[in-house]
Image: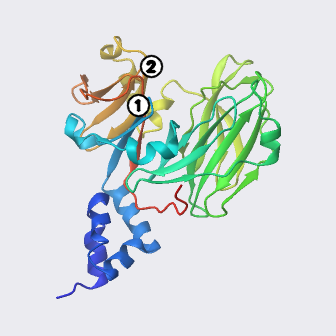
């Protein structure tokens, strides 16, 4: 007896990606359902709702994946370096949005930007930005980038920033996966009195790509925001001490309490990676060298023991997704 496509659809959205991909071999009908844009979109919505979150760890040309539910189990760490390492060629993990992870070879020079779906192992190398970027590409300048999702146009976009001088003068361009093209941003926000460091980290939140600079006038860190729907810069806001935790949906009062907990005194630079609301736990990356779980109810920490991970490393969570990256390289 054959199952109707609607029922197949409902069943498969509840199955982890690795098993869904195997199900493509069951029949042409199943393959057609799984590859359809409608199913891919529905699968992502179910993944978000069911909190299917994976963790990607990168360092020393190694690319590892693990499930947050089994973070203490070494056997749950999957090394995908052989599958994607030749493509990415040592690219550094930047950030992620839904099921896509952004990696780059950006240093002083603009070399290459990649988008990777860790679940399907599909990778796309973005084309070079416009001539105005390449003409200004020199050793006394540096660049950084990040991916975000524009819900208005249902499009994934990559923001590329090039800092032109030490006082933070910048150029910006946006790549659209739908348009398959870069768009220069003409009205770049004034940064005359700011310093944007070369290690600026980008975060995607509330429809915008956000990063932090230093305001010389107020002597405080401030946040830039680039609205992906409007493709324009937002105003600057003073960076609160607990903003790092607010970005993963922790109340401000609780965030401050967590960061001031004496349990963190033996660690430097706690960076929140994700919040498991069902378990009331936050995963922190400490000094790019180890992971620590913080139990909010018990106000206690537990160091995660994972062998074989690079040291130092960078990490990012991602949502399980079947999003296709058409151009394989």
Of residues 62 and 183, which is closer to you in this image? 62
Label 2 sits on residue:
269
Numbered badge on residue 80:
none
Q: Residue 254's image quarter?
A: top left
Scheme by which the image is coloured: rainbow
- Residue farthest bottom in this picture: 1
Front residue of this view, candidates 225 and 24 = 24
Q: Which of 139 and 148 is in front in this view?
A: 139
- Distance, label 1 to label 2, CA atoms, is 10 Å
In the rendered image, residue 112, in percent from the top left (x then y), is placed at: 62, 42
- Picture quadrant where residue 197 is located: top right
The 10 Å Cα crowd at callout 1, few under 14, some 14 to 19, many 20 or more, is many
Q: Quadrant of the C terminus?
A: bottom right
Q: From the viewer's side, name the closer residue of 39 and 104.
A: 104
Residue 186 shows up from this direction: no
- Residue 17, placed above or below residue 256: below
User: Picture coordinates of residue 224 (x, y %)?
Assistant: 66, 36
Q: Which residue occupies 62% across, 40% down?
A: 145
Residue 54 x %, y %: 34, 46
Q: Where is mark 1, residue-wise?
A: 272
* Left or right of residue 293, residue 104 in this image: right
């Amino acid at each position: 007896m054959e199952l109707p496509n609607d029922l197949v659809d409902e069943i498969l959205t509840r199955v982890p990606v690795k098993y869904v991909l195997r199900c493509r071999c069951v029949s042409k009908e199943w393959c057609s359902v799984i590859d359809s844009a409608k199913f891919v979109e529905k699968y992502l919505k179910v993944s978000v709702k069911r909190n299917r979150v994976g963790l990607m760890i990168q360092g020393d040309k190694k690319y590892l994946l693990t499930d947050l539910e089994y973070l203490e189990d070494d056997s749950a760490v999957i090394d995908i370096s052989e599958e994607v390492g030749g493509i990415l060629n040592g690219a550094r993990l930047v950030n992620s949005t839904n099921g896509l992870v952004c990696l780059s070879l950006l240093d002083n020079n603009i070399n290459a930007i990649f988008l990777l779906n860790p679940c399907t192992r599909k990778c796309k190398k973005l084309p070079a930005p416009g001539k105005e970027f390449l003409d200004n590409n020199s050793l006394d300048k540096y660049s950084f980038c990040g991916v975000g999702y524009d819900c208005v146009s249902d499009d994934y976009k990559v923001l590329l920033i090039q800092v032109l001088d030490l006082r933070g003068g910048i150029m910006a361009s946006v790549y659209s996966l739908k348009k398959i093209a870069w768009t220069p941003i003409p009205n770049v926000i004034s940064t005359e009195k700011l310093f944007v460091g070369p290690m600026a980290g980008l975060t995607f939140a509330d429809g915008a790509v956000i990063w932090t600079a230093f305001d010389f006038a107020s002597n405080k860190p401030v946040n830039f925001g680039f609205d992906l729907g409007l493709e324009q810069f937002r105003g600057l806001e003073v960076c609160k001490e607990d903003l790092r935790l607010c970005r993963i949906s922790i109340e401000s009062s609780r965030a401050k309490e967590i960061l001031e907990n004496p349990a963190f005194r033996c660690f430097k630079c706690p960076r929140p990676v994700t919040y498991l609301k069902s378990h009331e736990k936050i995963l922190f990356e400490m000094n790019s060298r180890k992971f620590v779980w913080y139990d909010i109810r018990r106000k206690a920490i537990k160091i995660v023991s994972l062998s074989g991970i690079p040291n130092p490393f960078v990490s990012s969570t991602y949502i399980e997704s079947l999003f296709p990256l058409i151009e394989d390289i």
